[in-house]
Image (spheres, rainbow, N blue to C red):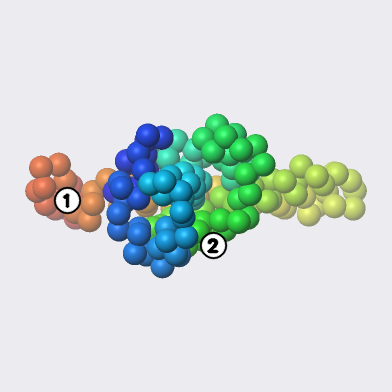
Amino acid sequence: MSVLANFDINNNFWEVNPGFKILGEFAKFYRKDTSKGKATSSKVMWAVAWFADVDSENRLKNFTEKDRKILISEEYIKEEKFNWKKYNVLIDYYRETQLSPSKRSLVFLRRKMEEREAFLVKTTYDLDNARDLDGIIANTDKIFSMISKLEQQIEKDESVGGGAVRGGRIESAGERKEI
Protein backbone atom coordinates (compact mmCIF):
# COMPACT_ATOMS: atom_id res chain seq x y z
CA MET A 1 0.00 0.00 0.00
CA SER A 2 1.23 3.47 -0.86
CA VAL A 3 2.39 5.90 1.78
CA LEU A 4 -0.11 8.33 0.27
CA ALA A 5 -3.04 6.06 1.12
CA ASN A 6 -2.81 7.64 4.60
CA PHE A 7 -2.18 11.20 3.43
CA ASP A 8 -4.09 13.82 5.34
CA ILE A 9 -2.81 17.30 6.08
CA ASN A 10 -3.80 16.75 9.69
CA ASN A 11 -1.79 13.51 10.09
CA ASN A 12 1.80 13.49 11.26
CA PHE A 13 3.84 11.58 8.70
CA TRP A 14 5.93 9.86 11.38
CA GLU A 15 2.92 8.68 13.37
CA VAL A 16 1.21 7.22 10.29
CA ASN A 17 4.46 5.75 8.91
CA PRO A 18 6.57 4.91 11.99
CA GLY A 19 8.84 2.52 10.08
CA PHE A 20 10.36 5.48 8.24
CA LYS A 21 11.96 6.62 11.52
CA ILE A 22 14.59 3.87 11.16
CA LEU A 23 15.19 3.97 7.38
CA GLY A 24 18.57 5.48 6.47
CA GLU A 25 18.17 9.02 5.17
CA PHE A 26 14.67 9.33 6.61
CA ALA A 27 15.94 8.38 10.07
CA LYS A 28 18.69 11.01 9.86
CA PHE A 29 16.16 13.63 8.81
CA TYR A 30 13.77 12.62 11.60
CA ARG A 31 16.48 12.82 14.28
CA LYS A 32 17.60 16.31 13.15
CA ASP A 33 14.11 17.81 13.49
CA THR A 34 13.73 19.72 16.75
CA SER A 35 10.23 21.05 16.07
CA LYS A 36 7.36 20.12 18.38
CA GLY A 37 6.04 16.68 17.43
CA LYS A 38 8.50 16.62 14.50
CA ALA A 39 5.92 18.73 12.63
CA THR A 40 8.45 20.36 10.30
CA SER A 41 9.97 17.13 9.07
CA SER A 42 6.51 15.56 8.87
CA LYS A 43 5.35 18.25 6.48
CA VAL A 44 8.47 17.87 4.35
CA MET A 45 8.10 14.08 4.23
CA TRP A 46 4.49 14.37 3.07
CA ALA A 47 5.69 16.79 0.39
CA VAL A 48 8.45 14.38 -0.67
CA ALA A 49 6.02 11.46 -0.89
CA TRP A 50 3.46 13.53 -2.76
CA PHE A 51 6.13 14.70 -5.19
CA ALA A 52 8.00 11.41 -5.70
CA ASP A 53 5.30 8.75 -5.61
CA VAL A 54 3.56 7.50 -8.75
CA ASP A 55 0.98 5.29 -7.06
CA SER A 56 -2.67 5.60 -7.96
CA GLU A 57 -3.37 7.37 -4.64
CA ASN A 58 -1.27 10.31 -5.82
CA ARG A 59 -3.60 12.78 -7.46
CA LEU A 60 -0.56 14.69 -8.76
CA LYS A 61 1.13 11.76 -10.48
CA ASN A 62 0.26 13.01 -13.98
CA PHE A 63 1.48 16.55 -13.39
CA THR A 64 4.92 17.51 -14.63
CA GLU A 65 7.61 17.55 -11.96
CA LYS A 66 7.79 21.34 -12.23
CA ASP A 67 4.02 21.72 -11.76
CA ARG A 68 3.99 19.27 -8.84
CA LYS A 69 6.71 21.25 -7.11
CA ILE A 70 4.86 24.52 -7.63
CA LEU A 71 1.52 23.15 -6.42
CA ILE A 72 2.97 21.44 -3.35
CA SER A 73 5.12 24.46 -2.45
CA GLU A 74 2.34 27.00 -2.77
CA GLU A 75 -0.72 25.07 -1.66
CA TYR A 76 0.61 22.60 0.91
CA ILE A 77 3.93 23.90 2.25
CA LYS A 78 2.71 27.50 1.84
CA GLU A 79 6.18 28.65 0.73
CA GLU A 80 6.34 29.95 -2.81
CA LYS A 81 10.15 29.70 -2.78
CA PHE A 82 10.38 26.30 -1.07
CA ASN A 83 13.92 24.93 -1.54
CA TRP A 84 13.38 21.52 -3.16
CA LYS A 85 17.11 21.07 -3.81
CA LYS A 86 17.66 20.92 -0.07
CA TYR A 87 15.61 17.70 -0.04
CA ASN A 88 16.93 15.95 -3.17
CA VAL A 89 18.58 13.29 -1.02
CA LEU A 90 15.20 12.46 0.54
CA ILE A 91 13.44 12.45 -2.84
CA ASP A 92 16.05 10.14 -4.36
CA TYR A 93 16.03 7.90 -1.30
CA TYR A 94 12.23 7.75 -1.34
CA ARG A 95 12.23 6.66 -4.98
CA GLU A 96 14.99 4.14 -4.33
CA THR A 97 13.34 2.56 -1.30
CA GLN A 98 9.62 3.00 -1.92
CA LEU A 99 9.21 2.55 -5.68
CA SER A 100 9.51 -0.73 -7.51
CA PRO A 101 11.97 -0.96 -10.43
CA SER A 102 9.09 -0.56 -12.90
CA LYS A 103 7.87 2.57 -11.08
CA ARG A 104 11.39 4.02 -11.08
CA SER A 105 11.56 3.35 -14.84
CA LEU A 106 8.23 5.10 -15.26
CA VAL A 107 9.49 8.14 -13.36
CA PHE A 108 12.63 8.20 -15.54
CA LEU A 109 10.69 7.97 -18.82
CA ARG A 110 8.20 10.64 -17.78
CA ARG A 111 11.05 12.96 -16.79
CA LYS A 112 12.75 12.40 -20.15
CA MET A 113 9.48 13.09 -21.97
CA GLU A 114 9.18 16.38 -20.08
CA GLU A 115 12.75 17.31 -21.06
CA ARG A 116 12.08 16.27 -24.63
CA GLU A 117 8.94 18.36 -24.82
CA ALA A 118 10.75 21.40 -23.41
CA PHE A 119 13.51 20.92 -26.00
CA LEU A 120 11.00 20.70 -28.85
CA VAL A 121 9.12 23.77 -27.67
CA LYS A 122 12.35 25.80 -27.63
CA THR A 123 13.59 24.53 -30.99
CA THR A 124 12.64 26.50 -34.07
CA TYR A 125 11.65 24.47 -37.09
CA ASP A 126 13.86 25.30 -40.09
CA LEU A 127 15.29 23.61 -43.18
CA ASP A 128 18.48 22.63 -41.38
CA ASN A 129 16.76 20.67 -38.61
CA ALA A 130 13.39 19.69 -40.13
CA ARG A 131 14.41 16.09 -40.79
CA ASP A 132 15.79 15.67 -37.26
CA LEU A 133 12.70 17.21 -35.65
CA ASP A 134 10.41 15.08 -37.80
CA GLY A 135 12.32 11.99 -36.63
CA ILE A 136 12.05 13.02 -33.00
CA ILE A 137 8.34 13.70 -33.33
CA ALA A 138 7.78 10.42 -35.19
CA ASN A 139 9.43 8.49 -32.33
CA THR A 140 7.22 10.08 -29.69
CA ASP A 141 4.64 7.32 -30.11
CA LYS A 142 7.26 4.67 -29.25
CA ILE A 143 8.12 6.36 -25.98
CA PHE A 144 4.46 6.84 -25.05
CA SER A 145 3.93 3.17 -25.82
CA MET A 146 6.75 2.26 -23.41
CA ILE A 147 5.20 4.48 -20.73
CA SER A 148 1.76 2.97 -21.33
CA LYS A 149 3.12 -0.59 -21.04
CA LEU A 150 4.86 0.26 -17.78
CA GLU A 151 1.68 1.84 -16.40
CA GLN A 152 -0.33 -1.22 -17.40
CA GLN A 153 2.21 -3.56 -15.81
CA ILE A 154 2.23 -1.53 -12.60
CA GLU A 155 -1.58 -1.48 -12.53
CA LYS A 156 -1.67 -5.23 -13.11
CA ASP A 157 0.91 -5.87 -10.38
CA GLU A 158 -1.03 -3.72 -7.91
CA SER A 159 -4.52 -4.91 -8.80
CA VAL A 160 -3.88 -8.61 -8.36
CA GLY A 161 -1.34 -8.30 -5.59
CA GLY A 162 0.70 -11.19 -6.94
CA GLY A 163 -2.25 -13.50 -7.64
CA ALA A 164 -4.54 -12.57 -4.77
CA VAL A 165 -8.02 -11.32 -5.47
CA ARG A 166 -10.83 -9.97 -3.31
CA GLY A 167 -11.49 -12.03 -0.26
CA GLY A 168 -7.91 -13.29 -0.24
CA ARG A 169 -8.57 -16.20 -2.59
CA ILE A 170 -6.07 -17.19 -5.28
CA GLU A 171 -6.85 -16.38 -8.93
CA SER A 172 -8.16 -19.25 -11.01
CA ALA A 173 -6.23 -20.40 -14.09
CA GLY A 174 -8.83 -18.64 -16.22
CA GLU A 175 -8.35 -15.36 -14.32
CA ARG A 176 -4.60 -15.71 -14.83
CA LYS A 177 -5.30 -16.27 -18.56
CA GLU A 178 -3.57 -19.64 -18.43
CA ILE A 179 -6.51 -21.40 -20.05
Tell me which corner region of the image, top left, top right, bottom left or bottom right, holds residue 125: top right
Above or below, 20 against 72 in this view is below
Count of labels in the image: 2
Residue 173 x/y as whole percent: 14, 53
Which residue is depicted at the point 62% across and 44% down?
82
Q: Is residue 177 visible?
A: no
Neighbour class for label 1 at 10 Å: few (<14), some, many (≥20)?
few
Find out whether the residues at labels 1 and 2 contact each other: C-beta distance under 8 Å: no
Which residue in the protein does label 1 denote? 164
> Which residue is at 68% across, 50% downward?
116
Depth order, front residue of 167/90: 90
Where does residue 49 sit, x and y in percent of width and height?
45, 48
Q: Secondary structure at mark 2?
A: helix
Name the side, left or right, on which 157 lies relative to 38: left
**Residue depicted at x 63% and y 49%:** 83
Residue at 11% x, 47% y is 168
Q: Is residue 86 left or right of residue 169?
A: right
Q: Outermost residue toward the right?
A: 127
52 left or right of 15? right
- The residue beneath circle 2 is 89
Residue type, mark 1 in image? Ala
Cα–Cα span, label 1 and label 2 = 35 Å
Q: Earlier in the sequence, mark 1 or mark 2?
A: 2
Q: Extreme top residue here?
A: 75
Circle 2 packing at 10 Å, graded few (<14), some (14-19), many (20+), is few
- 50 vs 134, nearest the viewer: 50
Q: Residue 37: x and y, percent?
A: 38, 46
Q: Nearer the viewer, residue 23 or 157?
A: 23
**Label 1: which secondary element:** loop
- Residue 38, position as x, y percentages in the image: 41, 49
Which residue type does callout 2 highlight? Val
